[in-house]
Image (cartoon, helix red, strand yellow):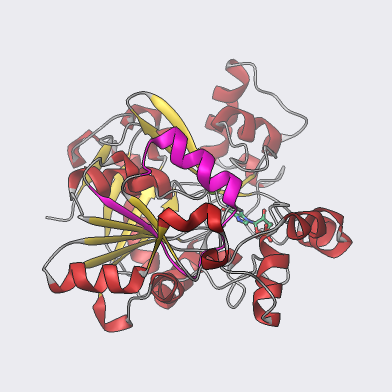
Amino acid sequence: MVSIVVGGHFGDEGKGKIISYLALHDNPDVIARAGVGPNAGHTVYKNGRRYGLRMIPCGFVNDNARLFVGAGVLVDIPTFLKEVGETNTGDRIRLDKRCAIIEDKHKEEDVKDKHLKTTVGSTGTGCGPANADRVHRTIKLAQDYPALKGFLADVPEELNKALAEGKKVLVEGTQGFCLSLFYGTYPFVTSKDTTASMMASDVGLGPTRIKRVYVVFKAYMSRVGSGPFETELDEKRAKSPLWKRLLEAARAKGFSGNNPNEAMAQYFGEKGTVTGRMRRIGDFDFASARYACMINGATDVAVTCIDKIFPECAKARAYDGLSSEAKDYIKRIEEAVGVRVTLVSTGPDAYDVIDLRG
Ligand code: IMP
Ligand code: MG
């Protein structure tokens, strides 16, 4: 049985947190990372330590799972080896032999190229230029690098064999729907599609193999980098009851920023995992969430950070632990997207989750 986790907005929805819950609670045998590459940073905690993972699946928090990186994922060798060391996963992680490798020239181009750096606002990790070289068919693959020799596998064979044996497979997507090269806010997008079908292809699973698609949304929205953000917090939106209350709480803690958007980014701790840039903050965009669920074929919706906008719900693990405002908010999301919200994250701990899957 295959489950895929993807982001529904601009990335940074808290996929790392939802994946760590699913990895620990559902105990999958195999966990595979899909998506673009090291431009994504997933935050995950294990034994009280914080990891900002860019190459290793967050599912490493489950010590028994075998870990894979799919052929569609771009690999940065120094980052990969560093994270293998930090997470001590060398004996159970494998890369597809056909992963394309990011070289120094790709990173240099990503920070020098005016269009990529300034207009698109790329993460500077070389992903765009590397995917361009891949399309030009001039890039080198993992199998060309001696440093990766002990790590290579045929990931589709491994995953499909695990399925044939009745095992559970969890696929981790990266980025978010609005950053999709096909469906996002082009040209302010990443260098590949970011929907569940792409993630399945990244790791070598056919569409008929996919049982569940979890689309993850944060209770509010954030965007790092440039580009349209329809529901971005401005002086007008700051007057809504929700933001008025949150801005007051932020000010009480000494976060005032230069404007409401900055104050809320500081209060929420919204800083890019990869780039360190402060994220832009905004209201939940119900229309784009519906569209994201449609194209992803969502079976489940996960809502994270509900405790950040409704602090009274912090660490709740049962539906009754939600305030009536929080319950109404969840209901509004369900009605807008037409899919049940089955996971609600109420805090940073992997088990701070209300699981309504039944
Ligand atoms: P690139 O993927 O580095 O080329 O960057 C293109 C756009 O996608 C920029 O606006 C980045 O900030 C954004 N982006 C790429 N990956 C992520 C992610 O994992 N989280 C949030 N934004 C991302
Ligand atoms: Mg991130």
Q: Decide whether residue 173 is among the magenta residues.
A: no
Residue occupying image coordinates x 49% and y 40%: 83
Q: Quadrant of the C terminus?
A: bottom left
> Is 288 located above or below residue 326 in the figure?
below
> Is 169 located above or below residue 296 in the figure?
above
Asked if residue 1 shows in the view, the reply is no
Residue 269: quarter of image: top right
Q: Where is residue 3 in the image (x, y as percent from the top left)?
A: 27, 64
Residue occupying image coordinates x 81% and y 60%: 109
Q: Where is residue 226 in the image (x, y as percent from the top left)?
A: 74, 55
Between 233 and 275, the residue placed more toward the observer is: 275
**In the drawing, does residue 155 fall left or right of residue 74?**
left
- Magenta part of the chain: 65-90
Q: Where is residue 257 in the image (x, y as percent from the top left)?
A: 73, 28
Residue occupying image coordinates x 66% and y 66%: 189
* Extreme residue in the front direction: 146
Q: Decide whether residue 84 is among the magenta residues.
A: yes
Q: Quadrant of the N terminus?
A: bottom left
Between 233 and 272, the residue placed more toward the observer is: 272
Asked if residue 60 shows in the view, the reply is yes
Residue 321: quarter of image: top left
